[in-house]
Amino acid sequence: MNDTAFRRMKDLPSTHLLGTGTPMCAGCGGLEALHQIYDVLGERTVFVNAAGCMTLLSVYPFTPFRGSWLYAAMASAPAGAQGIRDALDILLAHGRIRTEDDLQPVVLTGDGAAYGMGLSATSGAIERNLDFLYICYDNEGYGNTGQQYSAATPHAARTSTSRGVHGYAGEKKDLFAIWAAHRPAYVATVVGAEPLDLARKVETAKRLTGPRLIIALAPCPTGWDFDPQDAVAIGKLAVKTGIWPLKEYRDGQIRHTKMPHPRLPVEGYLKRQGRFAHLFAPQRNEKLLREIQSGVDRYWQQLEGIRAAPGGGGACT
Amino acid sequence: MGSNEKIYRIRFHGRGGQGMKTASRILGTAFFLSGFEIQDAPRYGAERRGAPIFAYVRAARSPINERGIIRRPDLVVVADDTLLPIPAAGVLAGVDEHTILLLSSDVRAAEWVDRIRFPGQLILLPKLGETEDPPGLRFLGATCAGAAARLAGPVARDCLEASIHMEAGPLGAAALAENLSRALAAYDAMASHAGCVQPATATSADDYIAPRWVDLPFEQASVSAPAIHGTLTSALSKTGLWRTLRPVIDYARCKRCWWVCSTFCPDGAIQVDSAGQPGIDYEHCKGCMVCVAQCPPHAIEAVTERGSQAEEAS
């Protein structure tokens, strides 16, 4: 990170590449992350979009991109990226495009595709060591269709398919660990509310070759039920409460890029979202609140245990 | 169905997030509980919270054969008066002398009649404690449904109440209570206009006039495929129309820390000039107010769009 172009907030790009006028909701945390990512990635990209909210970015005849965009079915975006990479490689080999005209295939999907339907195709792409970037905007549910639960939905959150008093009974799948277990070139978590951390990670990913995968937590005013103006505040709280650890995997090592000190109680994060309102009213659900807090505590305690152990440094097992 | 069957055709116009879909469901269910055949459906495209949307309800005593959006409404309910000047919102599409327009507005009815030259009867729905803030707008749908039910006439108060229990019950006790009180207050407030909506006769398939289609020759895929060759064409969509609140920068207090507002703006609608001064692109700012919440010196203020539009007009 010593050679990063992003040392301070001031170093962030002041001009933005992504076009305005998209149909994303006001206050969309996914769009916020995407526009920041695009500024660092640059124009020489081809986006491959699986079905989801961001499919709506490029609806004929509109596009906010400066380059190409390809639509793929929910499970197929990494396969689409493979096709584009292969086509570019053939054009390069035949001298039909110059090396400097080469493009970077970028998969863009929501958590529905990344955590669920598209996971097998992603696994295959990493296995084939496909040179591509994967960006998942994770709003923890099928947001485009009305926030049904997905494999990324956190424990106890209310979704349109988990409307009972206990919310979603399952646990959020650890996609970072699943991706990292494939030992790709790079895996990272980011959030638009921490733009400097995000810019450094995208910068790192851009310099590497091979499969590089980034999960952006995407606070969702519509699906999570909060006032759009709180989108950044909630993203910051996700980091400060430790519920969304900012980390990266590279060369077999996991490094946390922002340690929450002091780590705030998760309640502060949960209370600001309607999808957790049933944990506080009509009466506090101490059991579920405890479950969520102890899940976060366990994560960070385990991490401290690994760091304290001899030779420990967050090795990926 | 005989040609003299009457159908209630009611259209709700609002912005995504103002509960027009809920309004159509509440009213549709209330009609159903009153013994009617009904259709209720929202209609929106790819647009999101803040964008103009509409929903519609048909109700009749016998099976309804009409399909699709309502072109000749008997009642048009408008939750947000800033939609009226927007042609794309289509608020006044197909209205005539028999149409009732129920408008939620602070502006006097006479002034609206003058402004939009509405041919039918215009009734104002006084703003019953509504706010400009998105969280305060979520019960607007119940208000509109309650008022529409009374204007239509044949929906009894207890059917409206039962409908809200069905539609808003799953949202929890607090939301249910709020929806109930808003809808019933609006129902009561419309007592003097009860039953003023005149359902029109059902249209017969025999009267259907086919659209004047233009036949296009079959083109090669390179021509007919929906490929976008331009870049940044999204900017042609003026999403500034979604806004109910407008962020305004007080440049006397602005510290030129553009990297905060310009980076956090989800839409990239805050540009930075060569002097490091941020400027908001009002043609595209959707009014999320993230910049207002994040500005370190609190130099960005949220003002109502209605107020700023009035100021600009004067």
Image (cartoon, coloured by chain):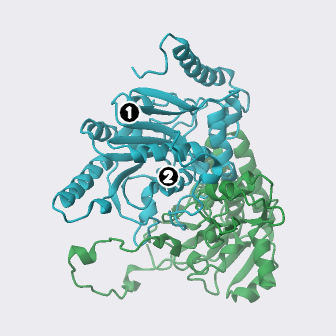
Q: Amino acid at mark 1?
A: Trp
Q: Is residue B137 visible?
A: no
Q: Are marks 1 and 2 in contact (CB under 8 Å)?
A: no
Residue located 55% across and 21% down the image: A299
Does residue A90 appear left or right of residue A78 in this picture? left
- The disc placed on residue A37 is 2
Residue A261 at x, y percent in the picture: 68, 28
Q: For the residue marked with disc 2, what is the amino acid?
A: Ile
On the question of residue A248 being in view, the answer is: yes
Looking at the image, the residue that sits furthest to the left is A94
Return the residue nearer the eye: A56 or B301: B301
Q: Is residue A61 left or right of residue A154?
A: left
Residue A179 disc label: 1
Secondary structure beneath label 2: helix
Q: Quadrant of the N terminus of chain B?
A: bottom left
The hue of chain A in the figure is cyan
Residue A175: image quadrant is: top left
Disc 1 versus disc 2: nearer the observer: 2
Q: Identify whether A201 is placed above or below A299.
A: below
The structure residue drawn at horizontal position 68% and vertical position 27%, both measured from the top left corner, is A263
Instruction: Give the drawing colour for chain B.
Output: green
